[in-house]
Image (cartoon, grey):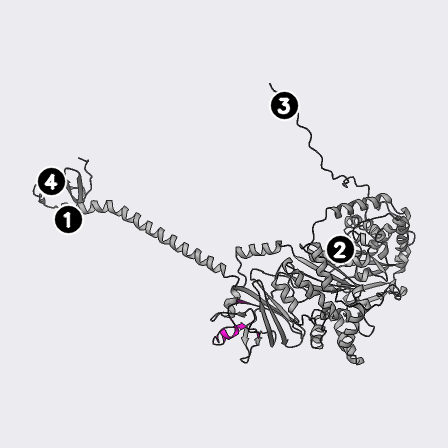
């Protein structure tokens, strides 16, 4: 038999009237063959009586106790058996319940996984996008790209319609609700910033949605719009006729890929709350898109702002915008941009003083088609008058006045002058083309010849800008100009006018002088100015393009970013620069320094990182305008030959007698009564102080200025050395 299990049962103490309880009789169960019950009573010090019942059985012994207020009763044998079964069956039932819950949770997780997987398969037909629109001063850009919501703040380029290189679209900042207009197939996007924005056309792809828009709104309005929409390519405009509560954008073309729609019941606020949501899958997809090698093509035209007619400045820039507005073979204004955005590409253009550059990128699979569309912009642009006014609004404010007010005053028809300008300057022998793709070279050459063979040849010599009159009046140039900049900066700029250096690219004399004057080591100008807490930065040379570097002249620029202390001691800063230039004239060219620069630039070019296709082809087609064929790739970077005579000629030109000083600070607000004609920049003009000129004449070079010492850390040997042989193993 098992040892008895003891438990107690107590009864409360008697009342005050009956402090002592009489002995209670215990009912003894009748004897049986299989079990018996015995009981006994105990009384504690507080008068509480406890009765203990013991069930005796051949296989076990069970003891129970019961505590009652007024009586003590023995538990029957049946209740003890039930209690025993409860002790045994309870844990088993609990385990079974837990197992059932685990099985149900597993089933729910499996169902959710399958549902998400099926939803992922439908992403090509149903995606969420953010629609963006931007307008400024009565103008609305004619194309808007809708991008995936995970793209938080993609940059914008010249057009809102053109996405950046690493993103497939653009977005803006505020929400624009979209409502249906007049029961027609066009739509109105309304916000608190403008009166109306009409959506003319919607084109969609799995990666982007292109919306053609036009607007009528108040003047001087600057706004950007954003909203969250869902694109369902299986739906058409007619499907939404009965859904008056939904917001959507529809297409006039019944065969269009689809519309842009917001589901019924979704409000602008609820959509906006989701606009910043992004998942890990979206990030992975963007990473994969960014890693794809894209194809690119760039075209450089030998003609820019210097080719503008005297009575219509800004015409070259306007034509740059207009050629993208369709061709005879591809007449749609936004056909090209829509095609690129669907296939991971974008396009852009820029107008410089002597050149205009166009480029595009696209997935290599669609490069041939995009190249043909691109080439026909130069072969047969439409140049429609209906697009003219909108594109005038897109150019910068500096030329808007010359393209609207001046032609109207003189009675000129702008579209006629635009076509004349195109015929004169957009000729095949003025153009250079660079293409880059993963396709075979023979195929790319064939596609380029076939596509660009339609570009006309006007059989006239290319423009020559070298015979222009001098750009600067020496008396007006050699002065001190105080300027109030937009940014809060304090800087002093020294400028010298030099002759054109296009044909001197192999010797690079200006780069040699710039390297020395811009050196930051001990003995340099910046080292001394920093030590005196007069300046924080120095910029020397020029960007080899535009206003600073052209066929008419070259500008040598030295800009010093001043501290507040330097602003008050400007004469000392200028003397330091002019003393250093005087030292260079006195010491003459140094071949040792030239060879160091030559070696460093050669190493930089040899181990240059791979560039993206669009800036690389853009740089290459520009180089084809100026360098020899063998120097197309290297002419911009390498120092080919040492020419001490040329270096001496340029150094002798950098004298105090020919310098232009431009001092910029917002502290000059009350000292600049003059206004620049086109942008209204406040400035003042005065003769250089006589005390400055006297201090600059034949100065003695101070000891703290000297040439940089030889650099022993310039690498010249890049051969891979073999590891030394392992020593012979010694066996003990």
Callout 1–callout 3 Cβ contact below 8 Å: no
The disc, 2 or 1, on the residue closer to the chain's N-terminal end is 1
The 10 Å Cα crowd at callout 3, few under 14, some 14 to 19, many 20 or more, is few
Q: Which residue is label 2 attached to?
A: 563
Report the disc number at residue 14.
1
Of the residues tagged 4 and 2, which is closer to the observer?
4
Q: Earlier in the sequence, mark 1 or mark 3?
A: 1
Secondary structure of residue under mark 3: loop
Location of residue 423 in the rendering, given as x and y in whole percent from the top left corner: 79, 71
Closer to us: mark 1 or mark 4? 4
The quadrant holding residue 455 is: bottom right
Q: Which residue is mark 3?
A: 729
User: Can see residue 681?
Assistant: yes
Residue 10 can be seen, yes or no:
no
Per the image, the residue denoted by label 4 is 34
Marks 1 and 4, Cα distance to the nearest angstrom? 38 Å
Q: CA distance from mark 3 to mark 4?
A: 89 Å
Residue at left 70%, top 71%?
327
């Amino acid at each position: 038999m098992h040892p008895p299990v003891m438990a107690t049962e107590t009864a409360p103490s008697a009342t005050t009237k009956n402090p002592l309880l009489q002995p209670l009789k215990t009912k003894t169960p009748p004897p049986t063959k299989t079990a018996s019950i015995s009981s006994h009573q105990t009384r504690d010090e507080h008068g509480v009586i406890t009765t203990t019942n013991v069930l005796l059985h051949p296989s076990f012994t069970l003891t129970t106790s019961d505590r009652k207020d007024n009586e003590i009763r023995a538990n029957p044998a049946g209740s003890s058996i039930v209690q025993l079964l409860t002790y045994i069956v309870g844990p088993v039932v609990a385990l079974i319940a837990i197992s059932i819950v685990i099985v149900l949770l597993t089933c729910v997780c499996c169902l959710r996984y399958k549902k998400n997987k099926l939803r992922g398969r439908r992403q090509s037909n149903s995606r969420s996008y953010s629609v963006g629109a931007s307008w400024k001063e009565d103008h609305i850009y004619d194309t808007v790209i809708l991008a995936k919501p995970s793209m938080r703040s993609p940059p914008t380029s010249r057009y809102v319609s053109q996405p950046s290189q690493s993103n497939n679209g653009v977005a803006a900042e505020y929400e624009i609700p979209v409502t249906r207009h007049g029961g027609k197939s066009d739509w109105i996007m309304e916000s608190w910033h403008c009166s109306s924005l009409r959506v003319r056309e919607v084109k969609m792809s799995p990666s982007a949605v292109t919306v053609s828009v036009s607007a009528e709104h108040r003047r001087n309005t600057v706004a950007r719009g954003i909203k969250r929409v869902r694109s369902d390519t299986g739906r058409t405009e007619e499907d939404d006729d009965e859904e008056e509560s939904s917001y959507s954008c529809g297409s006039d073309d019944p065969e269009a890929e689809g519309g842009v729609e917001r589901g019924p019941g979704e409000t602008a606020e609820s959509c906006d709350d989701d606009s910043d949501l992004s998942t890990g899958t979206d990030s992975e997809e963007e990473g994969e898109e960014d890693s794809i090698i894209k194809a690119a093509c760039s075209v450089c035209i030998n003609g820019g702002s210097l080719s503008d007619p005297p009575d219509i400045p800004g015409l070259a820039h306007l034509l740059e915008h207009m050629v993208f507005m369709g061709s005879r073979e591809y007449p749609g204004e936004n056909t090209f941009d829509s095609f690129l955005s669907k296939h991971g590409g974008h396009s852009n253009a820029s107008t410089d003083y002597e050149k205009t550059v166009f480029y595009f990128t696209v997935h290599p699979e669609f490069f041939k088609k995009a190249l043909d569309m691109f080439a026909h912009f130069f072969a047969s642009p439409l140049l429609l008058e209906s697009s003219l006014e909108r594109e005038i609004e897109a150019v910068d404010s500096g030329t808007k006045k010359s393209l609207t007010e001046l032609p109207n005053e003189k009675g000129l028809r702008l579209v006629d002058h635009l076509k004349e300008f195109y015929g004169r300057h957009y000729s095949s022998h003025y153009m250079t083309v660079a293409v880059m793709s993963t396709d075979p070279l023979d195929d790319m050459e064939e596609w380029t010849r076939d596509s660009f063979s339609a570009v006309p040849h006007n059989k006239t010599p290319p423009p020559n800008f070298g015979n222009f009159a001098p750009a600067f009046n020496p008396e007006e140039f050699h002065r001190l100009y105080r300027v109030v900049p937009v940014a809060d900066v304090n800087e002093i700029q020294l400028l010298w006018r030099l002759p054109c250096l296009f044909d001197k690219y192999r010797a690079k004399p200006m780069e040699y002088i710039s390297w020395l004057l811009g050196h930051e080591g001990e003995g340099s100008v910046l080292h001394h100015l920093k030590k005196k807490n007069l300046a924080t930065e120095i910029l020397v040379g020029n960007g080899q393009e535009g206003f600073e570097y052209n066929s008419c002249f070259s500008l040598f620029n030295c800009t010093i970013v001043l501290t507040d202390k330097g602003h008050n001691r400007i004469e000392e800063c200028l003397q330091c620069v002019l003393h250093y230039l005087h030292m260079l004239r006195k010491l003459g060219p140094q071949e040792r320094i030239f060879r160091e620069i030559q070696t460093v630039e050669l190493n930089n070019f040899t181990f240059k990182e791979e560039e993206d296709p669009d800036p690389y082809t853009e740089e290459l087609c520009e180089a084809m305008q100026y360098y020899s064929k063998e120097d197309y790739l290297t002419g911009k970077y390498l120092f080919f030959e040492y020419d001490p005579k040329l270096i001496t000629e340029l150094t002798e030109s950098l004298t105090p007698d020919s310098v232009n000083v431009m001092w910029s600070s917002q502290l000059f607000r009350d000292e600049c009564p003059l206004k620049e004609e086109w942008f209204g920049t406040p400035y003042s003009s005065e003769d250089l102080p006589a005390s400055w000129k006297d201090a600059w004449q034949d100065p003695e070079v101070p000891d703290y200025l000297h040439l940089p010492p030889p650099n022993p850390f310039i690498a010249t040997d890049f051969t891979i050395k073999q590891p030394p042989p392992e020593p012979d193993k010694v066996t003990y």
